[in-house]
Image (cartoon, rainbow, N blue to C red):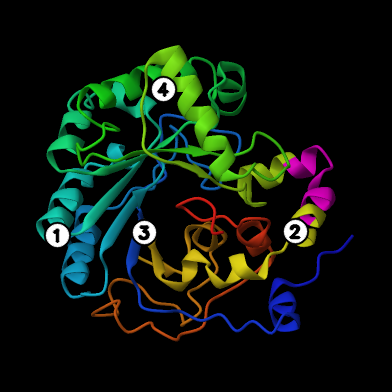
C-alpha cells in the first residue's frame, strides 16, 4: 500500500500547522557515539567524524544570547558528551538561565575522559534524559549491543547516588523507551509504573518520568524495515493511527534543530534527511535571532506519520 502524502492528510483533516514561538533549541552536536544502535535515526557510531567545532559552538552561544524566547537547550548526538565543546555550551546556556537537557546514552559515562561527567551534569543542574529502551537485558542488548544493559544500570546508579531522580533534589532524570520492532509504543502512562516498579525492585533505581517514543521510518530503522520486508506494513500502521490531536501538538511547532555544522531544520528527523527548514534554508551564520520564525511554514514528509500516530511522539514522549 502506498501511503497518502502527510501534507494531503493534514489538508483532508482541515489542519494548518505553522510555527509558534521558538522555545526549544535542539542541538545535534555531533554524530560520534560509543554505541551503534540498530534503531538510530542519526546513524551515529564510533567511526563518525562529524562534530560541532569550537567556532560553530561560539556562534551558537551568541545566537542563543540574542534569542529571548528560547527557554530550553536540548543537546543530542551521537553522544553529545564526546564533543570537546559540550561543557562550554552547557555552561554558557546555564549562565543565561536556560534549562539544559543532555540526551545521554548512559554507557558514555564509562568512556575515557568522562569519569567526572556525571558530577559536571549535577553541578550544572542539567536535566538528563537517558536511553533505556526496556528494563529487560535481552531487549536492550538486542537493540543496543552486548554489555550495554549492565553498564546502563551502573550509570543510573551513579546518577541516583548524585541525587538524580530523588524527590526534591531538583535533578531530573527521565528515561526513554522506544519499541524494539515495527510497532507503536504502549501508552506512556501505563508503561511508566511498570518501569518504576521493575527498576526499583531489581536494581533500587529511581527516576522521574518515562518518555515513549515511536521509531521513525528513516535511516537505520528504515533499512531494517526494508530488509525484513515490513516497511509497507509499518507505514500502514502509522497512517491508520494518524491522530489529528497529536498533529496539533507537534514538537516542530516550537523547536528548531541545529546540525553539527550550523544548519537549521524543523526537527532532528528532518535534519537527518537533509530537508531544509520550511521557512527557507538558513544557518547560524545568516540569522541574528531565532525569535522571528513564528507563523513560518514547516517542512513535512511521510516520516511525520511517526510523530502523529496513536498518542503521538516527540522528544519529550507522547503528545496526548
| Residue extent of the magenta highlight | 225-235
Looking at marks 1 and 4 on the same chain, the residue that comes earlier in the sequence is marked by 1
- Name the front one of labels 3 and 1: 1
Q: CA distance from mark 2 to mark 4?
A: 33 Å
Q: Residues within 10 Å of mark 3 (few under 14, many from 20)?
A: many
Q: Which mark is residue 26?
A: 3
The residue sitting at 56% across, 24% down in the picture is 140
The quarter of the rendered structure image containing the C terminus is bottom right
Q: CA distance from mark 3 to mark 2?
A: 27 Å
On whether residue 230 falls in the magenta region, the answer is yes
Q: Residue 125 vs residue 254: left or right?
A: left
Instruction: State the residue in front, 291 or 167.
Output: 167
Looking at marks 1 and 2 on the same chain, the residue that comes earlier in the sequence is marked by 1
What secondary structure is found at the residue carrying circle 2? loop
Residue 158, position as x, y percentages in the image: 27, 21
Residue 313 seen in this snapshot: yes
The residue sitting at 45% across, 78% down in the picture is 281
Q: Are marks 3 and 4 in contact (CB under 8 Å)?
A: no
On whether residue 27 falls in the magenta region, the answer is no
Residue 236, position as x, y percentages in the image: 82, 56
Q: Which mark is residue 80?
A: none
Residue, disc 1: 97
Looking at marks 2 and 4 on the same chain, the residue that comes earlier in the sequence is marked by 4
Looking at marks 3 and 1 on the same chain, the residue that comes earlier in the sequence is marked by 3
Residue, disc 2: 241
Residue 2, position as x, y percentages in the image: 86, 64
Residue, disc 4: 152
Q: Residues within 10 Å of mark 2 (few under 14, many from 20)?
A: some
Q: Residue 192 vs residue 116: left or right?
A: right
Residue 24, position as x, y percentages in the image: 34, 64
Amino acid at each position: 500500500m502506498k501511503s497518502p502524502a502527510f501534507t494531503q492528510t493534514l489538508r483532508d483533516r482541515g489542519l494548518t500547522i505553522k510555527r509558534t514561538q521558538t522555545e526549544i533549541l535542539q542541538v545535534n552536536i555531533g554524530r560520534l557515539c560509543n554505541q551503534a544502535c540498530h534503531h538510530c535515526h542519526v546513524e551515529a557510531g564510533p567511526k563518525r567524524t562529524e562534530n560541532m567545532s569550537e567556532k560553530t559552538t561560539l556562534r551558537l552561544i551568541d545566537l542563543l544570547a540574542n534569542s529571548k524566547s528560547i527557554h530550553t537547550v536540548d543537546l543530542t548526538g551521537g553522544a553529545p558528551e564526546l564533543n570537546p565543546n559540550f561543557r562550554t555550551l552547557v555552561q554558557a546556556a546555564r549562565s543565561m538561565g536556560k534549562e539544559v537537557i543532555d540526551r545521554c546514552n548512559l554507557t558514555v559515562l564509562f568512556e575515557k575522559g568522562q569519569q567526572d561527567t556525571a558530577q559536571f551534569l549535577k553541578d550544572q543542574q542539567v536535566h538528563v534524559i537517558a536511553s533505556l529502551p526496556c528494563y529487560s537485558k535481552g531487549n536492550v542488548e538486542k537493540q543496543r549491543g552486548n554489555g550495554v544493559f549492565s553498564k546502563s544500570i551502573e550509570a543510573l546508579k551513579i546518577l541516583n547516588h548524585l541525587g538524580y531522580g530523588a524527590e526534591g533534589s531538583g535533578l531530573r532524570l527521565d528515561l526513554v523507551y522506544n519499541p524494539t520492532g515495527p510497532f507503536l509504543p504502549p501508552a506512556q502512562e501505563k508503561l511508566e509504573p511498570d518501569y518504576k516498579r521493575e527498576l526499583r525492585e531489581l536494581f533500587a533505581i529511581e527516576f522521574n518520568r518515562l518518555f515513549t517514543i515511536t521509531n521513525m521510518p528513516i535511516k537505520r530503522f528504515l533499512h531494517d524495515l526494508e530488509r525484513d520486508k515490513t516497511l509497507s506494513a509499518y507505514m500502514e500502521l502509522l497512517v491508520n493511527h494518524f491522530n489529528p490531536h497529536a498533529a496539533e501538538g507537534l514538537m516542530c511547532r516550537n523547536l528548531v534543530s541545529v546540525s553539527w555544522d550550523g544548519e537549521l531544520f524543523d526537527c532532528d528527523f528532518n535534519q537527518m534527511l537533509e530537508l531544509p527548514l520550511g521557512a527557507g534554508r538558513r544557518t547560524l551564520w545568516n540569522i541574528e535571532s531565532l525569535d522571528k520564525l513564528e507563523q513560518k511554514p514547516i517542512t513535512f514528509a511521510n516520516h511525520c506519520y511517526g510523530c502523529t500516530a496513536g498518542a503521538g511522539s516527540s522528544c519529550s514522549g507522547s503528545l496526548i
